[in-house]
Image (cartoon, grey):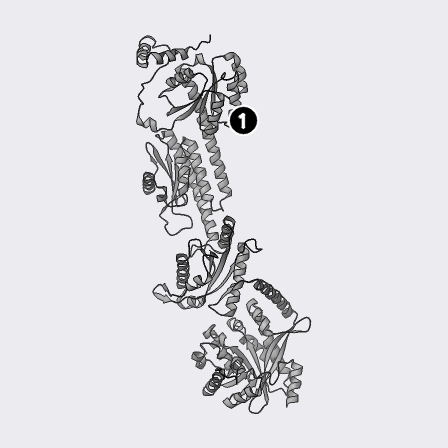
Amino acid sequence: MVEYGIIIRAYLLQLIGIRIIKAMVKRNLENDSDFLEFIEEVSPADKQDALIPWNILVVDDDTQVHETTTIALRNAIILDRPLKLTHAYSAQEAERILGETTDFAVVLLDVVMESDAAGLCLIHAIRDRLGLTDVRLILRTGQPGYAPELEVIRDYDINDYRTKSELSSTRLITSLTAALRSYDQICSLNYSRAGLEKMVKASADLFENRGIKEFAEGVLTQISGLIGAVPGGIVCAKRGFPGDNHDPDGLYIIGAMGHFARAINQPLSALGAPAIEADIKQVMAERCSLFNTERNVLYLQSGGQEEAVYIATGRPVRAVDQRLLEVFGTNISAGFANVYLFQQLNFLAFHDSLTGLPNRQGLLELYDQLQAEQPKERTVTLLDIDHFSEINDALGMSFGNEVLLAVTRRLRDELPDSAHVGRFGGDVIAVIAESDKVSIDFIINLFVSHFDITGYSLPVRVTAGSASSRDGSKYDNGAQIFQYAGMALSRAKRGHRGGFERFVENLAVESRQRLNMTSALKQAVSAKQLVLYYQPKIDLQSGKVVGAEALARWMGEQGDLIPPNIFIPLAEQSGLIIEIGEWVINEAIGQMKRWANTPLGDLHIAINVSAEQILAGTVIGPVRAAIEQHQIPATQLEIEITESVVIEDFDKVTNCIQVLHDMGIGVALDDFGTGFSSLSYLQRLAINTLKIDRAFIRNIGTPGQTEERIAEMIVALGKLLNLTTVAEGIETKEQEALAKQWGCRIGQGFLYAAPMSPDKFEQWVVNRH
């Protein structure tokens, strides 16, 4: 018969009555350590009930063992924490329980149950199948012969191995204490290792948006390992949020574990725990750590950054742990400061410093992220604020910044939450929106009403271009779709301000063609493939050739001429117009020199200059140098400036015209009548000639057209201001007759001749005379 010793004795005590037997124990067996020492049945204090218990699993096929173990460990406190017992009556039942609940600290395990080796088989299941390497195992056996102690200790990962007869109350608690201390140390090491792994990962992810979150999680895991706090009861808050200047003194959650994790990246109030919020606010206000009975808050400060780590321990933090936390906090504060610095740099790399909105790179990544999370048709719209440079020039850059802020604010307020607004660059604002929720008409209509900006009610208009994604399309990524939206915007700006263009496939083809042509033009300029053609100007009264306009032509490799309306805009956009313009000036004046001793010697030659040349200051110098080099009379030269050039920079254009006038060079205002401001500026410009735009000549004689009256008025205005008038685009005798009838002095057009090469022009003039 197996000797149960202490087990039978404890069982008898339960049967007879705890209070009677306790008196016997106290009176007769006071010095026998093998007897169980019972504690009062009443729980010691409500405080202990709130402590987190150690979970102990008791596995034995004998119900008496379970009962006596329960009695022996009732109200026991080990390492400042109570015990919670769970009972299994077979190895199979124990494996099921361990598979469902993994937070057991110790398993009290019988060796012999449904089979002689059931307990040892369960150890294999715990370690191998379930992967529970932290839980500590204490083997108890009533039949030690089935599992020799030496072999079991040597071959199995167990904490202790005792026969049931050895386990008095004191020895049982001693074994549990050793096992729980070992378990606690293992858990602390695991928490520390996990915390270090998170912190190392955070170091590698500093440039990711979650860098601070990962670092904070690592800190929280480290703290929970240091003092045995529950990870789910730890929160890390900071003052202000990286990159957000809206509320620099606000408190935000940057790290949390357990059910508080939902509040990460939100204000402190999102915790929904007033007591915790009050403790964190107190610590931030007093700038010192708080240690009380159940809740503790660690204060961290470094590099102008402040953080508070709330720690729910459920028990007082020991003095040694307080010192450990403070030392840890001092060291980790520098890490937080560095992480915040990198995070702020990361924010600035992907956000606009003025508006706080995504910048160009941020918008590209945002689009890709949205499509990866939820692929659908989205539209990217680029909005270019019209005349923004004039606003800056007239009212200052700070006012221009206020305009940008007002525009982005209205877009954010009026567009749905699913839409995203960013600053693509300069005065270009971008909108990413789901195509079926936001139309381009809706966006454009947001600019109908005026904007209230620092006391001004200002109309703001935009020119827009958009492109829409299509699932599976070859350009359904941020870089490509923004490129196509940019193409549409460029097309809209080439048309007229306030317009809008949608991207279509032929725009990409057109853009590639423009790029190829620009490259070819650059090579043509270097290879001197440009030539000058001359179109005659005719005195309408005498029919005599009085001058010519020099017009640049691009001779293609196949001998074909590429018209200027194609390559001049490319030259202006690419900056080649400066080089081409200087060549035209020198070549035309050189040709005048070559014609000096021919019948063409007294002809006036007109040269067109662009806005880019005038604004760059590359007109007067090359003209003066060419005149001096070729020794031709300045009075035979005329410079033609389009009306639109004048409004680009009136003061600079006026000064340029005045210098040319003072040199004796004539100045003609080309395409007159197509602008909106020339009449108010006309008297202030030192010009000699008005050239009537061909659009007013083309429809002469067509019923219902008003252009004829406008052309007549321009001629009358020229007479009033004592200016020579030139009618461009004369193609019929009727047009010539009307222009002569109005009193227009000079005509130019295909009725007389198309532009010709210098040799053909010279021969044409000789033949006409």
| Residue 592 shows in this picture | yes
Crowd band around label 1 with a 10 angstrom C-alpha radius: few (<14), some (14–19), many (20+): few
Q: Position of residue 21 (x, y in %)?
A: 32, 11
Name the residue: 46% across, 41% down: 214
Residue extending farthest to the bottom is 542
In front here: 663 or 19?
Answer: 19
* Location of residue 123 with respect to 614 vertically, above or below: above
In front here: 401 or 233?
Answer: 233
Residue that label 1 marks: 128
| Residue 628 shows in this picture | no
- The quadrant holding residue 563 is bottom right
Q: Position of residue 189 (x, y in %)?
A: 47, 30
In the visual, does 703 lie left or right of 760? left
Q: Secondary structure at mark 1?
A: helix
The number of callouts visible is 1
Q: Amino acid at mark 1?
A: Asp
- The quadrant holding residue 312 is top left
Q: Position of residue 472 (x, y in %)?
A: 56, 53
In the visual, does 326 lie left or right of 485? left
Name the residue: 52% across, 77% down: 641
Screen quadrant of the C terminus: bottom right
* Location of residue 129 with respect to 612 vertically, above or below: above
Name the residue: 46% across, 52% down: 348
In front here: 94 or 637?
Answer: 94
Q: Position of residue 735 (x, y in %)?
A: 55, 86
In the visual, does 10 lie left or right of 748? left
* Location of residue 364 with respect to 66 vertically, above or below: below
* Location of residue 146 with respect to 269 vertically, above or below: above
